[in-house]
Amino acid sequence: MCELLAMSANVPTDIVFSFTGLAERGGVTGPHVDGWGITFYEGKGSRTFKDACPSSKSHIAQLIKSYPIKSEIVVSHIRQANRGCVSLENTHPFTRELWGRYWTYAHNGQLSDYETKFSVSRFQSVGDTDSELAFCWIMEQVLFEFGDKAPADMRPVFRFIAGLADEMRALGVFNMILSDGNYLMCYCTNNLSYITRRAPFGEAKLIDTDVVIDFKKETTPDDVVTVIATRPLTNNEQWKILTPGEWTLFSQGELVTV
C-alpha cells in the first residue's frame, strides 16, 4: 500500500518537518519505493514535484526537505505500486481542472472489478492505475451532478464525493486525499489519521527519523495547521485515527461542518 500526507493551514506554512518523516518511509522505514509526489497550492495556482525514484533517495525530495515552500494546502503521496508500472505518469498526486480550479487527488489502496464501473469521457487517464481512473470518474460524476458552474456553497459537492467514495470502498481499499485549492477532504477505508496544531504550540518528534521541532519557535499564536497522514508521523502528540467510512473536510486548518 501507499502512504498519504496532506496539510491545511490558515497561513502559508511549510511542510518540511512532516515530509521529512514521510520521505523516510519511501525506502528506509517503509517499502514505498515506487515513486512519490507533492503538490503545493499558491492561490489558484499550484506547483507539483514528482519522481519515480524512492523518496528516501530522490534529489528532488531532498530539495523539498531543505527548501521551505510555504502553502496553505499541500497534498503528497509515496507509492508502493500494485496497479500500473513504476513510471512518472503513474505517480501521484494527480491533477485535473474543474470550474476554473485545479483539483488534486491522491489515493492509497487497491480496487478490483472497477474497469466497467469507471466510464469517463471528459476526464481521461494518462497512466494506467486504478487510482487515476477513479479520480477521473469522480470528476466526471461531480460535473454531471452539479453542472458547468461551481456551486456557491461547496460543502454539498464534498458530501456528494463522500458518497462516491463509499461506492469505491465496496471495490477495495480507498483512502483518499482531495483538494480544490480551498478545501481539503480526506476519506478513510482503513488507515488515515490527522492532528490539528494550534497555540499553545510545543515540541514534536518524528517516528521515522531523529528529528525534533519546537513549533512555538516557528509559529504565531494565531496559526492553525492540520496535518493528515496514513499513519501518525510523531510519537509525542495525540493524533485522531479515522474509522472506516469516516471522512473529514478542512479549510484554513479548521474542521468544516458538513
Image (cartoon, helix red, strand yellow):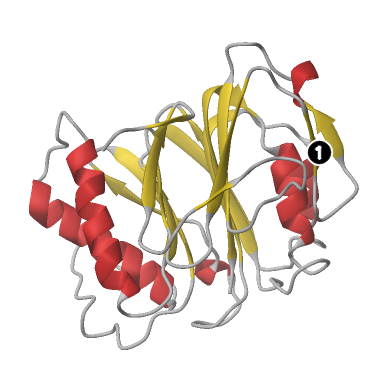
Residue 209 in the figure: left or right of residue 98: right
Residue found at the far right of this picture? 210
- Determine the secondary structure under disc 1: helix
Q: Position of residue 32 (x, y in %)?
A: 69, 71
3 in relation to 218, above or below:
below
Q: Which residue is drawn at 18% across and 53% down?
A: 142
Q: Nearer the viewer, residue 90 or 219?
A: 219
Q: Which residue is drawn at 47% across and 54% down?
A: 242
Task: Examine the rendering and report whether any part of residue 219 can be seen.
Answer: yes
Q: Residue at x 32, y 38 (%)?
A: 101
244 in relation to 43, above or below:
below
Q: Where is residue 233 in the image (x, y as percent from the top left)?
A: 71, 50
Number of labelled discs?
1
Q: Residue at x 22, y 48 (%)?
A: 159
Residue 107 in the figure: left or right of residue 247: right
Q: Which of 144 and 188 is in front in this view?
A: 188
**Label 1 Cα crowd, 10 Å radius (few <14 / some 14-19 / many 20+):** few
Q: Position of residue 119 (x, y in %)?
A: 19, 75
Q: Quadrant of the N terminus?
A: bottom right
Q: Nearer the viewer, residue 152 or 69?
A: 152
Residue 106 in the figure: left or right of residue 87: left
Mark 1 residue type:
Ser
Residue found at the far top of this picture? 221
Q: In which quarter of the image is the C terminus?
A: top left
38 in relation to 164, above or below:
above
Q: Position of residue 63 (x, y in %)?
A: 77, 44
110 in relation to 174, above or below:
below
- On the image, which quarter does residue 136 sit in? bottom left
Task: Examine the rendering and report whether any part of residue 123 can be seen.
Answer: no
Residue found at the far bottom of this picture? 113
Q: Mark 1 points at which residue?
A: 66
